[in-house]
Image (cartoon, rainbow, N blue to C red):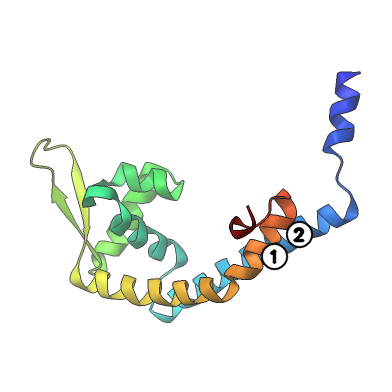
C-alpha cells in the first residue's frame, strides 16, 4: 500500500515534465555558451572550470586531489589536466611548505587574465538568462521568488 502511494505521489503530469525539460534545456544552453566562450580563448570548458576552481578555493590552496573532487574527475585525470594547464602557462605547482608530498596549484598572471575575461562574459550571460532560470526553478519547486516570501 505504501509503495503504491509513493508511486502516485511521484507521478508527474505533462506540465511538470515540460518544466523539467525547459530547465534542463536552459542549463544545457548555458553550458554550451560556456564551452564556446572557453573555445574563443583557446581553452576547453573543463580548463575554464579548473581555473575557476583554483581561483575560488578559500585560502588559495588547492591540491590536485581537491581539484579532482571539485571537477568530479579521477585524480589521474586531474594530473593530466594540470599538466596541460601548466604547459599553457596558466597554473603553476608549488610544493607545500608543511608537507613535501603535497603540491598546491596557483594561477599564473596569464591564467588570472584569461579567467577574468571568461568570468566576466559568464557573469554577463547569467545576468541575461538569470530571470528565466529563476522563473523555471520556481515553477519546478513551487516556491515563490525570494522577494515574494
Mark 1 nearby-residue class (10 Å; few <14, some 14–19, many ≥20): few
Q: Nearer the viewer, residue 82 or 108?
A: 108
Q: Residue at left 19%, top 45%? A: 103
> Is label 2 in contact with label 1 (beta carbons under 8 Å)?
yes
Q: Position of residue 26 (x, y in %)?
A: 66, 66
- Judge from the rendering whether residue 50 lies leftward or rightward of residue 4; answer left or right: left
Mark 2 nearby-residue class (10 Å; few <14, some 14–19, many ≥20): few
Tell me, for residue 25, which label it has, or none: 1
Q: Position of residue 102 (x, y in %)?
A: 18, 40
3D distance between C-alphas at marks 2 and 1? 6 Å
Q: Nearer the viewer, residue 88 or 52?
A: 52
- Judge from the rendering whether residue 93 lies leftward or rightward of residue 121; answer left or right: left
Q: Residue at left 39%, top 75%? A: 120
List the single residue furthest toward the top. 1
Relative vertical location of residue 1 with respect to residue 128 in this rendering, above or below:
above
- Judge from the rendering whether residue 148 lies leftward or rightward of residue 54; answer left or right: right
Q: Position of residue 119 (x, y in %)?
A: 39, 71
Q: Residue at left 39%, top 49%? A: 77
List the single residue furthest toward the front. 148
- Judge from the rendering whether residue 79 lies leftward or rightward of residue 61; answer left or right: right
Quarter of the figure with residue 117: bottom left
Quarter of the figure with residue 148: bottom right
List the single residue furthest toward the bottom. 40
Q: Position of residue 60 (x, y in %)?
A: 22, 52
Q: Under tag 1, what secondary structure?
A: helix
Q: Quadrant of the N terminus?
A: top right
> Which residue position holds label 2?
21
Amino acid at each position: 500500500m505504501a509503495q503504491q502511494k509513493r508511486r502516485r505521489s511521484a507521478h508527474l503530469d505533462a506540465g511538470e515534465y515540460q518544466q523539467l525539460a525547459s530547465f534542463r534545456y536552459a542549463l544545457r544552453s548555458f553550458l554550451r555558451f560556456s564551452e564556446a566562450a572557453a573555445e574563443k580563448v583557446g581553452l576547453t570548458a573543463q580548463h575554464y572550470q579548473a581555473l575557476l576552481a583554483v581561483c575560488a578555493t578559500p585560502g588559495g590552496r588547492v591540491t590536485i586531489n581537491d581539484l579532482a573532487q571539485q571537477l568530479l574527475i579521477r585524480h589521474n585525470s586531474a594530473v593530466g589536466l594540470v599538466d596541460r594547464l601548466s604547459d599553457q602557462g596558466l597554473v603553476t605547482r608549488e610544493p607545500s611548505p608543511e608537507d613535501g608530498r603535497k603540491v598546491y596549484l596557483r594561477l599564473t598572471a596569464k591564467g588570472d587574465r584569461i579567467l577574468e575575461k571568461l568570468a566576466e562574459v559568464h557573469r554577463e550571460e547569467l545576468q541575461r538568462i538569470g530571470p528565466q532560470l529563476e522563473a523555471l526553478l520556481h515553477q519546478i519547486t513551487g516556491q515563490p521568488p525570494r522577494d515574494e516570501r
